[in-house]
């Protein structure tokens, strides 16, 4: 057996300690180097951002000529991250500028050849890239046929966000092409988001397209679109109302949603019939329509509906009575005392109080 002397042990321990010290020092040097490299990259990124922000702001001023640094322009063409950052900032600025500033941003897009570059990036299936590119295309003042075709193709993408941004871009540029595609895809779009997109469409075109879509699709599809139309306060034709009520007569949701759209006294005969329905949602919407459009001959019907078993029917009937032209609230309350239905009396008093105190 070999015996290790204390001197040898000391030498071994010293060697190990020295190795550990060197390793620690090397690690610290490497970490310092990596940190410094990271800082430099961050500084370069910040410098690029500052440069392109300056370019974007100058583009909004028609007195400023668009002059690009060759190195930065080359980076824009070759570096996908820089390209995406610039087009996203460019799109964001469109939310806040109009007129000459908007034209200036378009000049910058033309100078940098946004569209060809965007179409190149859109050949990939990267969801993040596609969303950014669709948004930017929607902000261009003019778009090629190739761009329109690519956007239309993306309305069948597996990502709902890609579909949504592609539809919005199409709607801004070519509502006639986009609207049928949009109405086909409403099943995954939140109503408030759909309303925002549809507001960019000419009302006449929107009314015609939604009418056709409702009358040629399922009750679920029709009910959804009818609620969206109500949220937009889009006027629908008398013929459409009659056709929808006739086609979907056995669907409670669609009938109720259609009655909520009635805005012409010409349809009062239809409304009066539906106030006698045994189905609460239908009777509620019919009463609300009657309250909006009531003629003098409908006052007695409103009094009858004030005694209905449904709280909402009574409420809408009370609104209708109290919102008639030149109404005498005290006279109505006095007549309500002759009613035998205590719920009807209470409802009229409640709504009268709301009107007097400005709640309604």
Image (cartoon, rainbow, N blue to C red):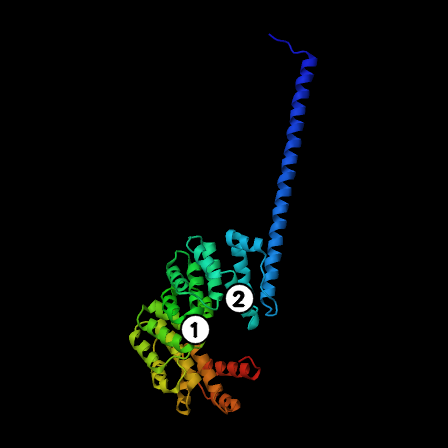
Choose the circle earlier in sequence order: 1 or 2: 2
Specify the quadrant that holds the N terminus: top right
Q: Nearer the viewer, mark 1 or mark 2?
A: 2
Q: Position of residue 182 (x, y in %)?
A: 39, 66
Foreground of the two, 25 or 246? 25
Decide if residue 68 is on the left or right side of residue 144. right
Q: Is mark 1 on a helix, strand or loop?
A: loop
Residue 159: image quadrant is bottom left
Q: Residue 280 carries which label?
A: none
According to the image, label 2 marks what residue? 107
Q: Is residue 295 left or right of residue 83?
A: left
Where 14 falls versus 318 (above or below)?
above
The image shows residue 160, relative to residue 298, as above or below, that is above
Residue behind mark 1: 201
Is residue 299 visible in the rendered image? The answer is yes
Q: Residue at x 64, y 29 (%)?
A: 23
Q: What residue do we see at 42% from left, 78% from top?
A: 313
Residue 339: x percent and y percent?
45, 86
List x then y, in percent, for residue 165. 45, 62
């Amino acid at each position: 057996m070999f015996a290790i002397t204390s001197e040898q042990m000391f030498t071994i321990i010293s060697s190990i300690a020295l190795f550990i010290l060197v390793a620690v020092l090397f690690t610290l040097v490497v970490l310092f180097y990596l940190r410094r490299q990271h800082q430099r990259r961050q500084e370069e990124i910040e410098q690029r951002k500052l440069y392109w922000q300056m370019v974007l702001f100058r583009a909004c001023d028609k007195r400023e000529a668009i002059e690009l640094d060759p190195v930065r322009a080359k980076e824009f063409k070759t570096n996908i991250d820089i390209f995406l950052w610039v087009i996203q900032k460019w799109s964001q600025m469109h939310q806040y500028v109009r007129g000459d500033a908007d034209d200036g941003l378009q000049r910058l897009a033309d100078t940098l050849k946004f569209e060809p570059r965007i179409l190149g990036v859109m050949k990939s299936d990267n969801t993040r890239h596609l969303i950014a590119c669709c948004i930017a295309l929607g902000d261009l003042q003019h778009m090629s046929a190739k761009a329109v075709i690519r956007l239309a193709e993306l309305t069948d993408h597996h990502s709902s966000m890609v579909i949504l941004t592609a539809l919005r871009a199409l709607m801004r540029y070519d509502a006639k092409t986009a609207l049928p595609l949009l109405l086909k895809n409403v099943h995954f779009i939140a109503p408030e988001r759909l309303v925002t997109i549809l507001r960019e469409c000419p009302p006449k075109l929107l009314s015609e397209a939604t009418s056709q879509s409702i009358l040629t699709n399922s009750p679920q599809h029709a009910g959804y679109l009818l609620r969206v139309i109500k949220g937009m306060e889009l006027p629908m034709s008398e013929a459409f109302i009659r056709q929808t009520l006739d086609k979907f007569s056995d669907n409670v949701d669609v009938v109720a949603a259609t009655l909520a759209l009635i805005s012409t006294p010409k349809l009062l005969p239809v409304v009066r019939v539906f106030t006698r329905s045994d189905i609460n949602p239908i009777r509620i919407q019919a009463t609300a329509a009657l309250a909006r459009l009531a003629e003098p001959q409908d006052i007695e019907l409103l009094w009858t509906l004030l005694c209905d078993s449904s709280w909402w029917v009574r409420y809408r009937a009370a609104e209708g009575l109290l919102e008639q032209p030149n109404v005498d609230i005290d006279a109505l309350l006095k007549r309500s005392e002759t009613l035998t239905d205590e719920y009807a009396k209470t409802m009229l008093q409640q709504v009268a109080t709301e009107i007097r105190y400005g709640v309604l």
